[in-house]
Amino acid sequence: MTAQSDSVQAHPVKNHTVQTYSPREFHRQAHDALENPQIRANFRKAMDGLMGKRREVFSDWDLETLRELGANIRQRALAKLPDLLEQLEANCEANGIRVHWAEDGEQACRLIRELCEARGAKSVIKGKSMVSEEMHLNEHLQAAGIDALESDLGEYLVQLNQQTPSHIIMPAIHLNTDEISEIMHNKTGTERTRDVDYMTAAARQQLRERFMAADVGVSGVNFAVAETGTLCLVENEGNGRMTTSVPPVHIAVTGIEKVVEQVRDVPPLFALLSRSATGQHVTTYFNMISGPRKTAEHDGPEEVHLVLVDNGRSSIYQDDELIETLRCIRCGACMNHCPVYTRVGGHTYGTTYPGPIGSILMPHLLGLEDTKDLPSASSLCGACGEVCPVKIPIPDLLVRLRREAVGEGRGNVRGAGVKRSKKEVAAWKGFQWLATHPSAWRGGTAVAGKLRALTPSRLGPWTEYRTAPKPAKVSLHALVKRHRAESRPSDSPAGTEETRS
Amino acid sequence: MTPVKLYPPRPEKVYLFGTCLIDMFYPEAGLDAMRLLEREGIEVHFPEDQTCCGQPAYTSGYQSEARAVATAQLGLFPEPWPIIVPSGSCGGMMRTHYPQLFAGTEQEALATEVSGRIYELTEFLVHVCHLRLDDRGQPEKVAMHTSCSARREMGLAETGPALLKSLGQVELVEQVRAAECCGFGGTFAVRHPEVSAAMVEDKTVAIEQAGAERFVTSDCGCLMNIGGRFEHQQKPVKGEHIASYLWRRTS
C-alpha cells in the first residue's frame, strides 16, 4: 500500500478539535460569513441548484395534495406517538432489534458507548445521522478511546476538515471543489485536483478499508415503522447499507418523533423527502432494516440496536402548536429556500440544525437563553413554509417563539422571557398608546410631516445601506380630507355624501 | 397556501385601510388607490380613526400590544363592505393573522368577520373590479416586486403583474429570483441589518440587470427598502407603489 493509506492511519479523528460555532454568536458569525465571498458564492450556487432541481422534479406532481397527505401522516403519527413507540418497541424486539430509550443526548451517548464497550469495540463507522451530531456522539466516543469515522462523503470531508455539517442533507455544501481537493490532499495525501471522480474514488477506497475493519456501525433512521418494527434509511452513497450490514453490530439512533404508523405511510413520505431534499425522484438506496442476520443468511450484523432519543422533544409534545415542529422529515428544503440561510450559510446558526427548521427546533433542545437570536433571524418571507413537504407552519412558529422569547407566549419553552427588555417593552407600549389614540396618531403624523427636514439622515444600520425614509409633508389622513373637500362640490362618484365618514 | 377564494360582485361601497407606512411615508399611494377605486364607480370610505394593523408588534412577539392596536381597528368597519388594503403585508396580517390573534377572546367572531372582508388592492382591482386600463404613459421597462406576504400569505403572485401587463406601453421585465425576499421583513431589517442589507443588495442588482428603468411594488416596506438602497447608491432606478403607478399612467 502507498503513503496514502499511511496518512489514513494518521487520521485527524484522533485528538481532533472541532471548529465550533455558537448560536449566541449568531450576529458575529453572520457578519463573518457575509464578508466571506467564498461562503457567499458556494451557498448561492448550491441553493440555486437545489431549488431548481426541486421545482423540476415536482413539476408533474399534484404537490399540494401530496404535501397534505404527508402532513396528515406525520400529524397522525404524532397524535398516537406514545402508543406507536410502544408498538415499535414490541415489534422491533420481536424482530430481534434491541430497543433502548434515552432521555437526553448524554444518556444516548452513554448507551451507545456501553454497547460498544460490551463488544470491546475500538472502531465505529458511522452512516449519516443528525441526531448523533445533536448529541455530540463522536466526541463522546473519542473521549472513551473509541474511534468514530463518518462514512457519508460530505460528513467525511467535514470531519477531515474538523468542522461540523453546515447543512443537514449536504454537510459539506459550504465547500467547493478546490477546497475539498485541498482538504483531501492535506489530510489523506491525495493529489490536488479538480477531478471530482478521482476524489470520490479516493475517498471511497479510504472508507472501504474502514468499513471492513469497523467493530460497530452507527446509523440514523428516516422512518421507523411501528406496525412492522422496520427501520428505513434513505441514502445515495451505499455507505448507509455498508454501515448497517458490514460490521458485526449495528446501532441505529433516532429521535422519538421519527416513528410512522404503517408501512404504507412510507412511500408518500419517501416521495416527498427525496424530491424535497435533493430533487431526486428516488434515492440510490432505500434500506429497510428488519433485524439482525438470521441463521440461514450469509451477511448482516449479529446484533441490531435501536436507541430512541427524546432530548427535549417531548417538551414540545404537549403544546398543540409547537408539536407541529416534530412533523419534520429532515429534508432541508426550508434551508435551501431560505434567503437568510443562503446568505449566511449553516455554520452561522451555531446549531446542529441550521436554517428555518433549526430556528424553530433548537430553542427546545438548547433553551431560548442560547438561541434567542434564531427566531428573529428571518424576514418571515414564508418561503420555508411554502416548500415544507409536511406543511409545518414555520413562519407562525417563528413568531410563536419570538413571543416566548419576550415573555408573551405560553411560557412553556425553556428560557421564556429571556429577550424581554425594559427598553423594548417601553417602545412597544408607546407604539400601542399612539396607535390606539387616533387623534394623537393624526397629530403625530402631522408633526412628523412638518418636521421632516429634521429627519435624521442616519438611522443606525439602516442608513449604512439605504437612504433614510422621510415622513411625507402631508399624511394620508390629511390628503383624504383635502380630496373630499375638492370632490364635495361636484357629484361624488357614487353613493351619497351623508354616509361618508 | 391560501384556499381558493370566491370573489363578490363589484360592490357600491368599500372601506380603505391605508396602512401606517402609507399614512406617514407614502400618502399619495393611498390617495391613488382611492382614486382608482372611485374611478370604477365605487364609493370609498376612509375611517378616520384608523392607525396601524398592529403587525410590527405582532411579528416582534409583542402579542398583547399587537392585539390592543388591532382591537382599535376592528370597530372601524361596521358596514358589510369589503375592506381594501393597498399592502400585501398589512392585508396578510388582517386576513390571516387576526383570527389567530383574537382566538379565544371576546372579539374572535368580529375579528374573523372582518378578516373575511379584507382584500389587497391589486387583488380587488383584478378579481372584483375586472379593471381595464388605458395606458397614457411613455414606453417603459418595469420590474414588479411582489411582496412575500402578497405572494405567499395572500396567494397573490399574479395580480400585480397582471395589472402591469395590461398597460399597453409598459414592458414587464422579469428579474432573476423574483420570488425571493428583498430583506425588509419589518423589524428584521433592524434586528439583522447586515443580513437584510445583503438581501436588498441582491434584489437591486437583479432588478437593474433585468433592464428595468423602474420597479413597482404593492408594499411600502419593500419600496422603502429597495428604493432606499437604489437611492443610497445613487442609481437611476426609481420605485413606485403600484397604485400610484397605475393612476399616474391612466389618468
Image (cartoon, helix red, strand yellow):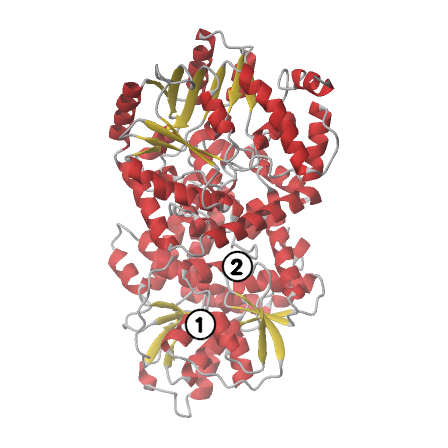
Q: Are circles 2 and 1 on residues that touch, CB within 8 Å?
A: no
Q: Nearer the viewer, mark 2 or mark 1?
A: 2
Q: Residues within 10 Å of mark 1 (few under 14, many from 20)?
A: many
User: Which badge, 2 or 1, is on the more N-terminal residue?
Assistant: 1
Quadrant including the C terminus of chain A: bottom left
Give the residue number, with chain letter if any, for mark 2. B179
Quarter of the view holding residue A296: top left
Say left or right for B206 vs A133: right
Rendering coords of residue A133 (x, y %): 51, 27
Q: Is residue A403 visible?
A: no
Q: Disc 2 is attached to a residue of which chain?
A: B
Report the side of A63 relative to A26 (left or right): left
Report the residue marked by disc 1: B122
**Residue at horizontal 39 percent and vertical 41 percent from the top:** A270
Q: Residues within 10 Å of mark 2 (few under 14, many from 20)?
A: some
- Residue A79 lies left or right of residue A416; in this view the side is left
Amino acid marked by disc 2 = Ala
Question: Quick one: quadrant of the N terminus of chain A?
Answer: top right
On residue A2, the disc is none
In x, y percent, where is residue A335? 51, 44
Chain assignment, label 1: B
Task: Relative to A140, say whether A175 is above or below.
Answer: below
Q: Nearer the viewer, residue A84 or A432?
A: A84
